[in-house]
Every structure is written in C-alpha cells, then in structure tokens.
C-alpha cells in the first residue's frame, strides 16, 4: 500500500512539474513575440483606415498620419477617437457609420504597448 502512495505521489509531482515547465515555455514564447513597429504594422493600417483625410498624398488636409512623429504624438487621441461610437462627436474614421474592426483597433493599442517603435 505504501508503494502505491509513493508511486502516486511521484506521478502527481511529475505532472505538476511538467505543467510548470509548459507555463514557463508559454511565457517565454510570448516574450519572444516580435514587437509591433510603425513601419511594419501601423503604417499599413493608417494608409487604409485614415485615408484620404490624414494622408496628404491622397488629397487630405488634416494632420498627416503617414508621418511617424505625428502618430507617436497623437496615439492616445487616435485610440480614443477610434473607440468612440459612430454617433459620438469626434468619432473616427469621419463619415463612417461603423467602428473599425476590433483587430484593427488592436494594432494601434499593441503598437503603443510595445513602446511606439518606428522600425
């Protein structure tokens, strides 16, 4: 009977340690996830979601968001406005009747969380 309990304790310990190892590997994998950058991730979203108003080469006359420094300065306001409801004053994108998809908004937020890197 003692052998049974000893084997059961060893098996339980092995399972617990195996789980801890998996959790550590998952945490390490998340740390190795590449950081979001303006050039690689955000500029494309801005080109499609903020044009033509904030892209001067497409005829816009608002603050240019195809310029890294402008986006870095205004990221908090940009996130605030794209999270508003379409009926709220200041909602962006202007003249649209629907919010940007959640995955698009997440690109803005991730870029900010990752430290607003340029390249």
Image (cartoon, rainbow, N blue to C red):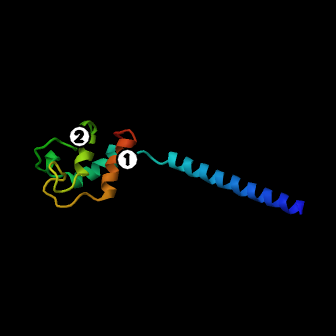
Tell me the distance, in whole angstroms, between the alpha carbons under discs 1 and 2.
18 Å
Label 2 neighbour load within 10 Å: few <14, some 14-19, many 20+: few
Identify which residue, 116 or 8, lies in the foreground.
8
Check disc 2 and report the residue beneath it: 67
Furthest toward the front, the residue is: 1
From the viewer's perspective, is 113 left or right of 48? Answer: right
How many callouts does the rendering have? 2
Is residue 65 or residue 82 the one in the foreground? 82
Q: Mark 1 points at which residue?
A: 110
Give the image location of residue 38, x and y in percent: 32, 44
Q: On the image, which quarter does residue 116 sit in?
A: top left
Q: What element carries label 2?
A: loop
Tell me the SS state at disc 1: helix
* Front: mark 1 or 2: 1
Whether residue 67 is situated above or below residue 52 in the rendered picture:
above
The answer to whether one can see residue 40 in this image is no
């Amino acid at each position: 009977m003692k052998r049974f309990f000893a084997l059961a304790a060893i098996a339980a310990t092995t399972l617990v340690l195996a789980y801890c190892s998996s959790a550590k590997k998952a945490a390490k994998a998340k740390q190795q996830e590449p950081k979001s950058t303006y050039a690689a991730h955000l500029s494309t979203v801005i080109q499609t979601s903020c044009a033509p108003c904030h892209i001067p080469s497409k005829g816009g006359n608002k603050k240019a968001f195809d310029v890294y420094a402008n986006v870095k300065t205004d990221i908090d306001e940009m996130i605030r406005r794209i999270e508003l409801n379409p009926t709220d004053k200041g909602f962006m994108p202007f003249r649209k009747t629907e919010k940007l998809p959640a995955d698009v908004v997440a690109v803005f937020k991730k870029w900010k969380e990752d430290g607003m890197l340029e390249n």
